[in-house]
Image (spheres, rainbow, N blue to C red):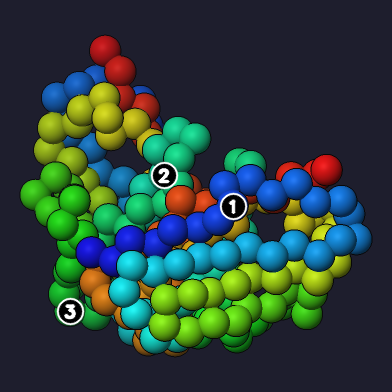
Amino acid sequence: EIVMTQSPATLSVSPGERATLSCRASQSVSSSLAWYQQKPGQAPRLLIYGASTRATGIPARFSGSGSGTEFTLTISSLQSEDFAVYYCQQYNKWPRTFGQGTKVEIK
Amino acid sequence: EVQLVQSGAEVKKPGESLKISCKGSGDSFTSYWIGWVRQMPGKGLECMGIIYPGDSDTRYSPSFQGQVTISADKSIRTAYLQWSSLKASDTAMYYCARHGGGEGYFDYWGQGTPVTVSS
């Protein structure tokens, strides 16, 4: 099973600042990497797939990069609605596996 | 618009059985894999397994193999997750979600079904 490790566990950021979240895979997943946002009491929402393709309706301030084992989600200028938990997920191999999440909180 | 609507909250006792559902909208329901994802209280996301409603081909994550059964009825565009004997450790939120673009990411999610198992 591919283990996905996210860092940091918690990221404290001020509104308007840039946030950079990392995700590392225990073996190469090529570009088969997705990012999700989850707010309290809500289902996760797909942000990015294919490591760098924004899902429908996702604002341009969200961007993804990386391939192989190292991936990054960048939120260029944090808005109030962006404070949430973010998960990465690989879908290169079965079983699909998620990272443990990064909580982005208001500084 | 694609919608996945899940059945309501459940409160059960250890040892009881349970079947929860996920109903999809649109004719494309049978053309996409549907997955079940567990989220234990305060924890992260875990993929339990996936099913292709068109032919009921099913795959289970090793951690959940033998612990749950995933099924589907394509005639009513509904996928199911069931337990034969619940444990307290099955207490969690369960989401169904659709694999997008024929790949393995989840592009549409149900609203979640909370399951509480307590004596």
Residue A6 % position (x, y) = 50, 58
Q: Nearer the viewer, mark 1 or mark 3?
A: 1
The amino acid type, in three-letter code, at marker 2 is Gln
SS state under label 2:
strand
Real-space CA distance between mark 1 and mark 3, rounded to the nearest whole angstrom: 41 Å
Q: Which residue is mark 2?
A: B39
* Residue drawn at x 46%, y 51% as measured from the top left: A100
The amino acid type, in three-letter code, at marker 1 is Pro
Q: Is residue B12 left or right of residue A41?
A: left
Q: Is residue B23 left or right of residue A58?
A: left
Residue A17, by quadrant, is bottom right
Residue B23, by quadrant, is bottom left
SS state under label 3:
loop
Evaluate whether residue A83 shows in this view: yes
Name the subunit of mark 2: B
The answer to whether residue A14 is above or below residue B118 is below
Q: Which residue is mark 1?
A: A8
Q: Is residue B112 left or right of residue B13?
A: right
Residue A10 % position (x, y) = 63, 45
Q: Nearer the viewer, residue B75 or A26?
A: A26
* Residue drawn at x 21%, y 60% as measured from the top left: B61
Name the subunit of mark 3: B
Residue B72, by quadrant, is bottom left
Real-space CA distance between mark 1 and mark 2, rounded to the nearest whole angstrom: 20 Å
**Could you confirm whether marks 1 and 2 are on the same chain?**
no
Residue B38 % position (x, y) = 36, 48
Q: Which mark is residue B55?
A: 3
